[in-house]
Image: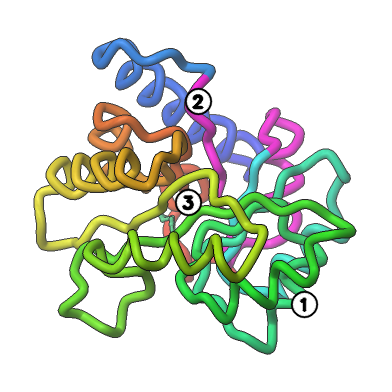
Amino acid sequence: MTRELEIAQNLAKVRERIAKAAASSDRNLEEITLIAVTKNFPVSDAQILYELGIRDMGENRDEEGARKSEQLPADIAWHFQGQIQSRKIKSIASWADVVHSLDSLSHAEKFAALVEGKPIEFFLQINLEPEREDRGGIAPNALEEFLDQLKVKTEIVPIGLMTVAPIDQDPTRSFLKLAQLGKVAKVSKLSMGMSGDFEAAIAAGATHIRVGSSILGSRGYRA
Ligand SMILES: *Cc1c(COP(=O)(O)O)cnc(C)c1O
Protein backbone atom coordinates (compact mmCIF):
# COMPACT_ATOMS: atom_id res chain seq x y z
CA MET A 1 0.00 0.00 0.00
CA THR A 2 1.30 3.47 -0.82
CA ARG A 3 1.74 6.04 1.92
CA GLU A 4 -0.89 8.22 0.17
CA LEU A 5 -3.46 5.45 0.38
CA GLU A 6 -2.57 4.58 3.97
CA ILE A 7 -2.97 8.20 5.12
CA ALA A 8 -6.14 8.67 3.07
CA GLN A 9 -7.72 5.60 4.67
CA ASN A 10 -6.69 6.63 8.19
CA LEU A 11 -7.98 10.15 7.64
CA ALA A 12 -11.29 8.86 6.31
CA LYS A 13 -11.70 6.75 9.45
CA VAL A 14 -10.91 9.70 11.70
CA ARG A 15 -13.39 11.92 9.83
CA GLU A 16 -16.00 9.21 10.21
CA ARG A 17 -15.32 8.97 13.96
CA ILE A 18 -15.65 12.76 14.25
CA ALA A 19 -18.93 12.77 12.33
CA LYS A 20 -20.35 10.01 14.51
CA ALA A 21 -19.28 11.69 17.74
CA ALA A 22 -20.71 15.03 16.58
CA ALA A 23 -24.01 13.45 15.56
CA SER A 24 -24.46 11.57 18.80
CA SER A 25 -23.86 14.68 20.90
CA ASP A 26 -25.87 17.02 18.66
CA ARG A 27 -22.82 19.04 17.71
CA ASN A 28 -22.45 20.84 14.44
CA LEU A 29 -19.51 19.45 12.42
CA GLU A 30 -18.54 22.97 11.33
CA GLU A 31 -17.70 23.96 14.88
CA ILE A 32 -15.06 21.24 15.22
CA THR A 33 -11.60 21.87 13.76
CA LEU A 34 -9.45 18.82 13.10
CA ILE A 35 -5.79 19.63 13.64
CA ALA A 36 -3.59 16.96 12.07
CA VAL A 37 -0.55 16.61 14.32
CA THR A 38 2.39 16.14 11.98
CA LYS A 39 5.18 16.11 14.60
CA ASN A 40 7.90 13.51 13.98
CA PHE A 41 6.58 12.85 10.49
CA PRO A 42 8.20 14.07 7.28
CA VAL A 43 7.14 17.05 5.17
CA SER A 44 6.02 14.59 2.50
CA ASP A 45 3.31 13.29 4.87
CA ALA A 46 2.14 16.83 5.58
CA GLN A 47 2.01 17.39 1.81
CA ILE A 48 -0.22 14.33 1.43
CA LEU A 49 -2.50 15.66 4.17
CA TYR A 50 -2.67 18.99 2.36
CA GLU A 51 -3.79 17.23 -0.80
CA LEU A 52 -6.45 15.43 1.24
CA GLY A 53 -7.85 18.79 2.31
CA ILE A 54 -6.22 19.32 5.69
CA ARG A 55 -5.55 23.00 6.38
CA ASP A 56 -4.75 22.84 10.12
CA MET A 57 -1.51 21.21 11.22
CA GLY A 58 -0.02 20.85 14.67
CA GLU A 59 3.63 20.81 15.72
CA ASN A 60 5.37 20.54 19.11
CA ARG A 61 8.85 21.77 18.20
CA ASP A 62 9.90 25.13 16.85
CA GLU A 63 12.52 23.89 14.38
CA GLU A 64 10.23 21.29 12.91
CA GLY A 65 7.29 23.65 12.56
CA ALA A 66 9.45 26.38 11.03
CA ARG A 67 10.85 23.96 8.47
CA LYS A 68 7.54 22.40 7.49
CA SER A 69 5.63 25.67 7.31
CA GLU A 70 8.27 27.04 4.95
CA GLN A 71 7.99 24.08 2.60
CA LEU A 72 4.21 23.81 2.45
CA PRO A 73 1.53 26.05 0.90
CA ALA A 74 0.72 29.31 2.68
CA ASP A 75 -2.96 28.60 3.30
CA ILE A 76 -2.23 26.18 6.15
CA ALA A 77 -2.92 27.31 9.72
CA TRP A 78 0.00 26.13 11.87
CA HIS A 79 -0.78 25.25 15.47
CA PHE A 80 2.03 25.24 18.03
CA GLN A 81 1.09 22.91 20.87
CA GLY A 82 4.44 22.06 22.49
CA GLN A 83 6.10 23.35 25.59
CA ILE A 84 7.21 26.95 25.02
CA GLN A 85 10.83 27.85 25.61
CA SER A 86 11.50 31.51 26.14
CA ARG A 87 14.35 31.72 23.66
CA LYS A 88 12.22 30.15 20.92
CA ILE A 89 9.33 32.59 21.14
CA LYS A 90 10.54 34.91 18.41
CA SER A 91 10.86 32.03 16.00
CA ILE A 92 7.55 30.42 17.01
CA ALA A 93 5.80 33.74 16.43
CA SER A 94 7.22 33.87 12.91
CA TRP A 95 5.44 30.73 11.70
CA ALA A 96 2.67 29.75 14.14
CA ASP A 97 -0.85 31.06 13.56
CA VAL A 98 -2.27 29.58 16.74
CA VAL A 99 -0.46 28.85 20.02
CA HIS A 100 -2.23 26.29 22.22
CA SER A 101 0.26 26.08 25.07
CA LEU A 102 0.54 29.54 26.58
CA ASP A 103 0.92 29.16 30.35
CA SER A 104 3.33 31.86 31.47
CA LEU A 105 2.92 35.63 31.82
CA SER A 106 6.50 36.33 30.83
CA HIS A 107 6.00 34.30 27.65
CA ALA A 108 2.78 36.20 26.99
CA GLU A 109 4.64 39.50 27.29
CA LYS A 110 7.27 38.31 24.83
CA PHE A 111 4.62 37.19 22.34
CA ALA A 112 2.68 40.43 22.79
CA ALA A 113 5.70 42.40 21.66
CA LEU A 114 5.88 40.33 18.47
CA VAL A 115 2.29 39.92 17.33
CA GLU A 116 1.80 43.35 15.84
CA GLY A 117 3.05 42.35 12.43
CA LYS A 118 1.29 39.01 12.42
CA PRO A 119 -1.73 38.17 14.51
CA ILE A 120 -1.60 34.97 16.55
CA GLU A 121 -4.49 33.30 18.33
CA PHE A 122 -3.82 31.98 21.81
CA PHE A 123 -5.19 29.19 23.92
CA LEU A 124 -4.18 28.95 27.57
CA GLN A 125 -2.96 25.49 28.52
CA ILE A 126 -4.51 24.11 31.69
CA ASN A 127 -2.84 21.45 33.81
CA LEU A 128 -5.60 19.28 35.24
CA GLU A 129 -3.16 17.47 37.51
CA PRO A 130 -1.26 20.41 39.01
CA GLU A 131 0.35 18.15 41.60
CA ARG A 132 2.47 16.93 38.69
CA GLU A 133 4.74 19.85 37.97
CA ASP A 134 6.50 18.21 35.05
CA ARG A 135 3.36 18.92 33.05
CA GLY A 136 2.87 22.23 31.31
CA GLY A 137 -0.14 24.35 32.03
CA ILE A 138 -1.84 26.70 34.47
CA ALA A 139 -3.37 25.10 37.57
CA PRO A 140 -7.18 25.44 37.53
CA ASN A 141 -7.23 27.45 40.74
CA ALA A 142 -4.66 29.89 39.33
CA LEU A 143 -6.59 30.60 36.12
CA GLU A 144 -8.56 33.67 37.23
CA GLU A 145 -5.49 35.37 38.62
CA PHE A 146 -3.60 34.53 35.41
CA LEU A 147 -6.35 36.10 33.28
CA ASP A 148 -6.36 39.25 35.41
CA GLN A 149 -2.60 39.62 35.12
CA LEU A 150 -2.68 38.87 31.40
CA LYS A 151 -5.12 41.74 30.92
CA VAL A 152 -2.97 44.13 32.93
CA LYS A 153 0.28 43.21 31.22
CA THR A 154 -0.62 42.48 27.59
CA GLU A 155 -3.12 43.02 24.81
CA ILE A 156 -3.48 39.27 24.39
CA VAL A 157 -7.06 38.05 24.60
CA PRO A 158 -7.06 34.24 24.64
CA ILE A 159 -9.68 32.58 22.46
CA GLY A 160 -9.83 29.36 24.43
CA LEU A 161 -8.39 26.79 26.81
CA MET A 162 -6.37 23.70 25.98
CA THR A 163 -5.55 20.56 27.91
CA VAL A 164 -4.10 17.10 27.59
CA ALA A 165 -6.26 14.70 29.60
CA PRO A 166 -4.30 12.94 32.35
CA ILE A 167 -3.78 9.33 31.18
CA ASP A 168 -4.87 7.64 34.37
CA GLN A 169 -8.19 9.50 34.71
CA ASP A 170 -11.56 9.29 33.02
CA PRO A 171 -11.16 11.60 29.98
CA THR A 172 -14.81 12.69 30.09
CA ARG A 173 -14.35 14.08 33.59
CA SER A 174 -11.24 15.98 32.49
CA PHE A 175 -12.94 17.42 29.42
CA LEU A 176 -16.04 18.50 31.34
CA LYS A 177 -13.73 20.19 33.82
CA LEU A 178 -12.04 22.12 31.01
CA ALA A 179 -15.43 23.11 29.59
CA GLN A 180 -16.43 24.42 32.99
CA LEU A 181 -13.17 26.41 33.28
CA GLY A 182 -13.87 27.80 29.80
CA LYS A 183 -17.06 29.33 31.16
CA VAL A 184 -15.16 30.87 34.06
CA ALA A 185 -12.64 32.31 31.61
CA LYS A 186 -15.46 33.43 29.25
CA VAL A 187 -13.83 31.85 26.22
CA SER A 188 -15.66 29.95 23.51
CA LYS A 189 -12.97 27.59 22.22
CA LEU A 190 -11.78 24.33 23.76
CA SER A 191 -8.73 22.52 22.40
CA MET A 192 -8.99 18.99 23.77
CA GLY A 193 -9.02 15.42 22.54
CA MET A 194 -6.30 13.35 20.87
CA SER A 195 -6.30 10.04 18.96
CA GLY A 196 -7.44 7.96 21.91
CA ASP A 197 -10.08 10.23 23.41
CA PHE A 198 -11.41 12.75 20.89
CA GLU A 199 -14.95 11.32 20.88
CA ALA A 200 -15.25 12.07 24.61
CA ALA A 201 -13.80 15.54 23.96
CA ILE A 202 -16.35 16.27 21.24
CA ALA A 203 -19.17 15.15 23.52
CA ALA A 204 -17.86 17.57 26.17
CA GLY A 205 -17.68 20.50 23.74
CA ALA A 206 -14.26 20.43 22.03
CA THR A 207 -13.91 22.94 19.19
CA HIS A 208 -10.35 21.87 18.28
CA ILE A 209 -9.12 18.28 18.40
CA ARG A 210 -5.43 17.46 17.93
CA VAL A 211 -5.01 14.11 16.23
CA GLY A 212 -1.68 12.53 15.29
CA SER A 213 -1.24 8.77 15.47
CA SER A 214 -4.73 7.82 14.26
CA ILE A 215 -3.92 9.61 11.01
CA LEU A 216 -0.18 9.12 10.50
CA GLY A 217 0.53 5.96 12.51
CA SER A 218 2.64 5.52 15.58
CA ARG A 219 5.46 8.00 15.90
CA GLY A 220 8.95 6.64 15.79
CA TYR A 221 8.25 3.90 13.30
CA ARG A 222 8.88 6.64 10.76
CA ALA A 223 10.66 9.90 11.54
C1 LIG B 1 1.36 14.52 20.22
C2 LIG B 1 0.27 15.37 20.70
C3 LIG B 1 -1.05 15.21 20.21
C4 LIG B 1 -1.46 14.09 19.26
O1 LIG B 1 -1.47 12.88 19.96
P1 LIG B 1 -1.99 11.50 19.28
O2 LIG B 1 -2.25 10.63 20.44
O3 LIG B 1 -0.88 11.04 18.40
O4 LIG B 1 -3.21 11.82 18.51
C5 LIG B 1 -2.01 16.10 20.65
N1 LIG B 1 -1.72 17.09 21.53
C6 LIG B 1 -0.48 17.27 22.04
C7 LIG B 1 -0.23 18.37 22.99
C8 LIG B 1 0.54 16.41 21.64
O5 LIG B 1 1.77 16.57 22.17
- 25 and 111: which is toward the camera: 111
Query: Do callouts 3 and 1 mark residues in contact (Cβ within 8 Å)?
Result: no
| Disc assigned to residue 90 | 1
Graded by Cα atoms within 10 Å as few (under 14), some (14 to 19) or many (20 or more), the crowding at tag 3 reads many
Q: CA distance from mark 1 to mark 2?
A: 36 Å
Q: Amino acid at mark 2?
A: Ala
- 152 and 135: which is toward the camera: 152
* Residue at image point 54% right, 44% down: 159
| Disc assigned to residue 98 | none
Q: Amino acid at mark 1?
A: Lys
Horizontal relation, residue 67 to residue 87: left or right: right
* Residue at image point 34% right, 43% down: 182
Looking at marks 1 and 2 on the same chain, the residue that comes earlier in the sequence is marked by 2
Q: Within 8 Å: ligand 1 and the Cβ of disc 3? A: yes
Q: Quadrant of residue 218?
A: bottom left
Residue at label 3?
212
Relative to residue 166, is residue 131 depicted above or below?
below
| Disc assigned to residue 12 | 2
Q: Residue furthest bottom?
A: 87
Badge 3 marks a residue whose secondary structure is: loop
Q: Residue furthest front?
A: 152
Foreground tag (3 vs 2): 3
Badge 2 marks a residue whose secondary structure is: helix
Horizontal relation, residue 166 to residue 102: left or right: left
Q: Quadrant of the C terminus?
A: bottom right
The image position of residue 2, as x and y in percent, is: 64, 41
Q: CA distance from mark 3 to mark 2?
A: 14 Å
